[in-house]
Image (cartoon, rainbow, N blue to C red):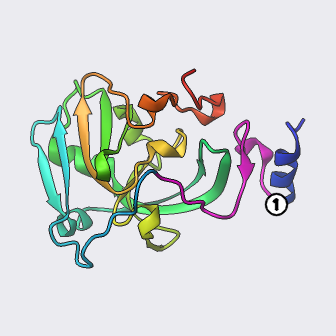
Amino acid sequence: MFRGKAERKVQEAGYDPARLPPGQYLTEKWPVLHAGDVPSYPADLGGWDFRVYGEVDSPLTLTWDELNALPKQTAVEDIHCVTRWSRFDAEFTGVPWSAIRELAGQRPSARYAIAHAEAGFTANVPASFLDAEGALLVTHADGEPLAPEHGWPLRLVVPGKYFWKSAKWLRAIELRATDEPGFWERYGYSNDADPWREERYAF
């Protein structure tokens, strides 16, 4: 039994309607949504770095070349935005958290991860979500380097959460023993952000 028009459109497009979370509609486009301006960087990314700190034995600061030299994986997954669009079979390539975790020496006390991005943006998830299948520090989407409006040079992709948790223009991951609400969570968005439970807002 379909939930309605959105599911019928999914079936007409040749997909299983069960892939669409409640309240979503399918699009082939990748809408651009973010707070603030798109950051600009030098073409060679000179001066850019990525940090890992907090509940780790060896805090890291990696240049772009150092990050780019780490092993990479490609994952194909569905993404779901809190503004109700879903995009199926998005292809992402990037560094798996396991490569970073090994370098930094993630401690057992690291229960939460805070993604720090440009302009003070943050997004929080349980640290276990960084180890989920398909979770990546992404450099490429659909076979091409990330477009600036989609987070070039680096964004986080966290499956199983609404897409605002997948922070664009990523600059650091802070591992913590305790949780801390991120940018949108402080504005009333759900801390858990499970699209299958339609956890959009905290109120």
The answer to whether 93 is drawn above or below residue 145 in the figure is above
Name the residue tied to disc 1.
Answer: 13
Instruction: Identify the residue shown where x is 34% and y is 33%.
Output: 127
Q: Residue 77, image x and y in percent? A: 57, 53
Task: Give the amino acid type for the residue marked by disc 1 in the picture.
Answer: Ala
Is residue 170 or residue 196 the one in the foreground? 170
- How many numbered discs, if any? 1
Determine whether, in the image, residue 32 is placed left or right of residue 106: right
Q: Residue 163, image x and y in percent? A: 52, 46
Q: Residue furthest left?
A: 58
Mark 1 residue element: loop
For disc 1, the neighbor class at 10 Å (few under 14, some 14 to 19, many from 20) is few
Instruction: Identify the residue shown where x is 24% and y is 49%.
Output: 100
Q: Residue furthest bottom?
A: 43
Is residue 102 or residue 35 the one in the foreground? 35
Q: Residue 45, image x and y in percent? A: 22, 72
Instruction: Identify the residue shown where x is 45% and y is 36%.
Output: 184
**Displayed quadrant of residue 14:** bottom right
Is residue 151 or residue 104 the one in the foreground? 151
In the image, the segment drawn in magenta is: 14-34
Q: Residue 11, image x and y in percent? A: 84, 53
Instruction: Identify the residue shown where x is 73% and y is 38%.
Output: 23
Question: Is residue 20 one of those drawn in magenta?
Answer: yes
Determine whether, in the image, residue 147 is placed left or right of residue 5: left
Determine whether, in the image, residue 104 is placed left or right of residue 145: left
**Displayed quadrant of residue 12:** bottom right
Quadrant for the C terminus, please: top right
Is residue 185 or residue 75 the one in the foreground? 185
